Image (tube, rainbow, N blue to C red):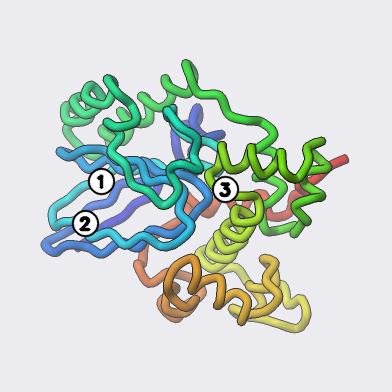
Amino acid sequence: MECYVERPPLPGLAGVVRTVWIQRTGEAAYVQRHLPTGGVEIHFPLGGHPQLVGPLTRPEIEVIPAHTTIVGVRFHPGTAPPLPTVLDDLVDQRLGLSELWRGSVERLVEAVARAGDPERALMVVQAHLLQEFRRTVRVDPLVGDAVKALMPWHPVNIDTVATHLALSASQLRRRCLHAVGVSPKVLQRTLRFQGFLALAQAGATATGRRGADGMAGLAIDVGYADQAHLSRECLRLTGLTPRALLGGDLDRCACVHDHSASYGPFLAIRSRPLLRG
């Protein structure tokens, strides 16, 4: 039976990594639907070759072979491990880390192989990333501020975000494309949908704004015009309707994975004002 467990990252990575995880497949291959999150991911199959999944703008379907164990890292939008190119060159791509981290991947693969079990392997990968971020990676602070401002809880106009950051709209777009991989508008739409998933995964109750409850209420709470608007975006980003994605319930997704480590921090900023004077 397939099993997937999410964890918070090491404290030193919390500012750049959203969540880490371990996934195991059982006797049969498992069909995994990867969804756009606004960030990049590292997938490290034990005994195999690690890959980087670039920023997604559409669902990616992966068939994971039987008896496979993968440790993974999901980054916040605007943060990424050291790469030889800007992120808009990696959109909707899956690349071997050996193509991007020349020289260091072999040593990391060997260290992961020596780890002995998935828990230790995940710690080895995180320790490597911690060293890389301390030594070489520089995160664009203005893009980080833009990502926070584009979170769904307080809908804001893109031009307003640019003005708040003392950038022109074209400057914000260029920096966002380089550091995130997508434009501010596409990122805002992705984060809005992630916000809906966060509410659904947390079993949140709609606030009842505009008299709507259930799925329609959550759609309005996160910034959609109505449930039909949510449904269109869900189809575009996941290839499924909201109910098909969530298995018909608002407190779990059809994959029955526990995503609390991923969505907990996402929900923690729900009540905070994002743009301050």
Residue for badge 1: 70
Q: What residue is shown at x 31% (from left), y 55% (from top)?
A: 4
Q: Between residues 119 and 17, which one lies in front from this camera angle?
A: 17
Dot in front, 3 or 2: 2
Amino acid type for the residue under numbered disc 1: Ile
Mark 2 element type: strand
Above or below, comparing residue 30 to residue 179 in the picture: below
Mark 1 element type: strand
Residue for badge 3: 265
Mark 3 element type: helix
Dot in front, 3 or 1: 1
Question: Which of the two labelled residues, at mark 3 and mark 1, occupies the earlier sequence position?
Answer: 1
Quick check: 145 left or right of 95? right
Dot in front, 1 or 2: 2
Q: What residue is shown at x 78% (from left), y 56% (from top)?
A: 157
Q: Between residues 39 and 96, which one lies in front from this camera angle?
A: 96
Toward the right, the furthest residue is 277
Disc sitting over residue 64 in the figure: 2
Disc sitting over residue 117 in the figure: none
Q: Between residues 273 and 104, which one lies in front from this camera angle?
A: 104
Cα separation between marks 1 and 2 = 9 Å
Cα separation between marks 3 and 2 = 28 Å
Q: Residues within 10 Å of mark 3 (few under 14, many from 20)?
A: some
Above or below, comparing residue 154 to residue 251 in the picture: above
Above or below, comparing residue 193 to residue 22 in the picture: below
Question: Which of the two labelled residues, at mark 1 and mark 2, occupies the earlier sequence position?
Answer: 2
Task: Where is residue 178? Give x, y as percent.
Answer: 56, 37
